[in-house]
């Protein structure tokens, strides 16, 4: 009877490793998804602030008023003189806005309050 000295893992050892990896993933993945959602939310808040900055700078340098239209998960920036021409379109995945229009003029270039709903259903406001 000869014993071969084949080096390798047994089937039981491989199964134990797979089970441990599965348990680790079942713990880590839900937390990872929550972190991704938080990062998306913060990124969209920053994007919203940049829209306000863009609108104020645009009205100041072009001396022409803008209209910012909020509609559910979309924001449209249009010129007040040519409302049918959309200057910018922004899509959001985690923020929801009530239907509203903001008018930004070169003379009245102050931030305005915008309300939105977070992914958790909370109502929040931000200066735009």
Image (cartoon, rainbow, N blue to C red):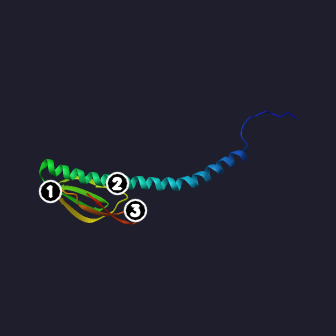
Q: Which residue is at a point 31% across and 52% down the rendered structure image?
A: 47
* Distance (Cα) linking label 3 and label 2: 12 Å
x, y percent for residue 24: 60, 51
- Residue 105's disc is 1
**Mark 2 against mark 1, which lies toward the viewer?**
1
Q: Which residue is at a point 68% across and 45% down the rendered structure image?
A: 14
> Relative to the observer, which residue lies in front, 43 or 19?
43
- Give the position of the N terminus as an image quadrant: top right
x, y percent for residue 108: 15, 58
The answer to which of marks 3 and 1 sits earlier in the sequence is 1
Q: Secondary structure at mark 3?
A: loop
Name the side, left or right, on which 23 lies relative to 116.
right
Residue identified by numbered label 2: 44
Question: From this viewpoint, which residue is outermost toward the front?
Answer: 110
- Count of labels in the image: 3
**Mark 2, other Cα within 10 Å: few <14 / some 14–19 / many ≥20:** some
* Distance (Cα) linking label 2 and label 1: 24 Å
CB-based contact (under 8 Å), mark 3 and mark 2: no
7 w.r.t. 38: above or below: above
- The image quadrant of residue 100 is bottom left
Residue identified by numbered label 3: 119
């Amino acid at each position: 009877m000869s014993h071969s000295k084949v080096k390798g893992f047994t089937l039981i050892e491989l199964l134990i490793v797979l089970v441990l990896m599965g348990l680790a993933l079942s713990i880590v993945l839900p937390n990872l998804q929550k972190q991704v959602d938080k990062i998306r939310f913060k990124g969209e808040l920053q994007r919203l602030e940049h829209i306000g900055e863009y609108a104020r700078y645009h009205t100041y340098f072009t001396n022409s008023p803008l209209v910012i239209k909020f509609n559910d998960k979309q924001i449209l920036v249009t010129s007040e003189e040519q409302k049918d021409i959309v200057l910018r379109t922004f899509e959001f995945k985690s923020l929801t806005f009530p239907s509203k229009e903001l008018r930004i003029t070169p003379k009245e270039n102050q931030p305005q309050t915008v309300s939105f709903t977070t992914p958790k259903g909370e109502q929040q406001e931000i200066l735009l």
